[in-house]
Image: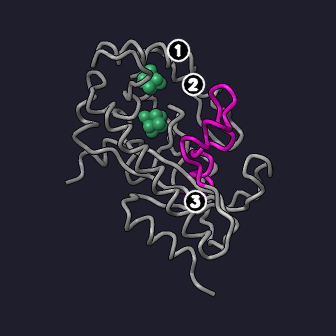
């Protein structure tokens, strides 16, 4: 049988993905994963100079980058799902439109972050962001669901934040509550979404004159992000 894991990874990497992970979703409720057993998560990193630039306040360049990367992620997962379908498998790209349709309030049906941890790409930090060993939190992610016979990686069930409190201390809105994530810990236990939203809007307005929910302080300060930023 063809090595479909290799085929899909090659396709995604050659089209601009920075990380690709495959995870088993079998333990999640069937309705959130369209009864499909496997998830493929794709990450694209933010440019270093953009992340360095938000140390004081979010910038217009950072805001613009979100749109650029989100569009790129949509096309990557659409491409990946299309490839798997061309081999006769079922595949659903969790594009921004797909996620919006399945969203209840602020929660998506199957968050990309869940797919990412099932694929062993990283863990959920105290900041409620995905933290990867390679790039810290300076990544944006998307995912696709499939029944293709892909080889899943070992999932990550525990955070590797340890005693670090940097994002809790740095959050100007006191939105990061300081709890360590493990499977089953909800987003609400980790951070106060309303406080984050309020502060992020204020900071975006001060930073580049648009009142939008964009801050990024917890991305920039994370030591895993810093480690990548400081790599030559
Ligand atoms: S995005 Fe800003 S306001 Fe929200 S949790 Fe991170 S540091 Fe706090
Ligand atoms: S700053 Fe520290 S506590 Fe926060 S996500 Fe990064 S490693 Fe975890």
Q: Position of residue 47 (x, y in %)?
A: 28, 45
Circle 1 or circle 3, nearest the eye: 3
Q: What residue did someone put label 2 on?
A: 191
Q: What residue did someone put label 1 on?
A: 195
Residue found farthest to the bottom: 1
Q: Residue at x 40, y 25 (%)?
A: 214
The vertical placement of 29 against 164, above or below, is below
Q: Residue at x 59, y 73 (%)?
A: 86
Q: How many residues crowd around disc 1 within 10 Å: few (fewer than 14), some, or many (20 or more)?
A: some
Residue 149 location, quadrant: bottom right
Q: CA distance from mark 1 to mark 2?
A: 9 Å
Magenta part of the protein: which range? Answer: 93-120
Q: What residue did someone put label 3 on?
A: 40
As helix, strand or loop, the secondary structure at mark 2 comes to loop
As helix, strand or loop, the secondary structure at mark 1 comes to helix
Depth check, front residue: 181 or 1: 1
The vertical placement of 54 against 159, above or below, is above
Q: How many residues crowd around disc 3 within 10 Å: few (fewer than 14), some, or many (20 or more)?
A: many
Residue found farthest to the left: 232
Q: Position of residue 37 (x, y in %)?
A: 73, 61
Is ligand 1 less than 8 Å from the beta carbon at label 2?
yes
Mark 2 or mark 3: name the one nearer the start of the chain.
3
Q: Position of residue 125 (x, y in %)?
A: 52, 38
Q: Are marks 1 and 2 in contact (CB under 8 Å)?
A: yes
Is ligand 1 less than 8 Å from the beta carbon at label 1?
yes
Q: CA distance from mark 1 to mark 3?
A: 32 Å
114 in magenta: yes
The vertical placement of 173 against 94, above or below, is above
As helix, strand or loop, the secondary structure at mark 3 comes to strand
Mark 1 or mark 3: name the one nearer the start of the chain.
3
């Amino acid at each position: 049988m063809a090595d479909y894991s290799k085929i899909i990874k090659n396709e995604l990497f050659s089209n601009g993905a920075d990380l690709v992970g495959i995870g088993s979703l079998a333990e999640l409720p069937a309705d959130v994963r369209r009864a499909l057993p496997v998830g493929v998560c794709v990450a694209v990193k933010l440019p270093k100079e953009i992340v360095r630039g938000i140390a004081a306040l979010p910038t217009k360049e950072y805001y613009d980058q979100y749109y650029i990367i989100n569009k790129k992620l949509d096309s990557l997962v659409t491409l990946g799902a299309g490839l798997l379908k061309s081999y006769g498998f079922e595949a659903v790209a969790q594009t921004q439109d797909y996620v919006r349709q399945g969203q209840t309030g602020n929660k998506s049906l199957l968050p990309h972050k869940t797919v990412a941890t099932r694929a062993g790409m990283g863990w959920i930090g105290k900041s409620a962001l995905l933290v990867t060993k390679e790039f810290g939190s300076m990544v944006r992610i998307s995912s696709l669901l499939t029944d293709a016979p892909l080889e899943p990686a070992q999932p990550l069930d525990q955070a590797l934040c340890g005693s670090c409190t940097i994002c809790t201390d740095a959050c100007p809105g006191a939105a990061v509550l300081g709890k360590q994530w493990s499977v089953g810990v909800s987003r609400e236990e980790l951070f106060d979404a309303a406080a984050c939203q309020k502060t992020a809007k204020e900071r975006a307005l001060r930073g580049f004159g648009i009142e939008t929910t964009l801050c990024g302080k917890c991305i920039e300060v994370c030591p895993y992000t810093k480690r990548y930023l400081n790599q030559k």
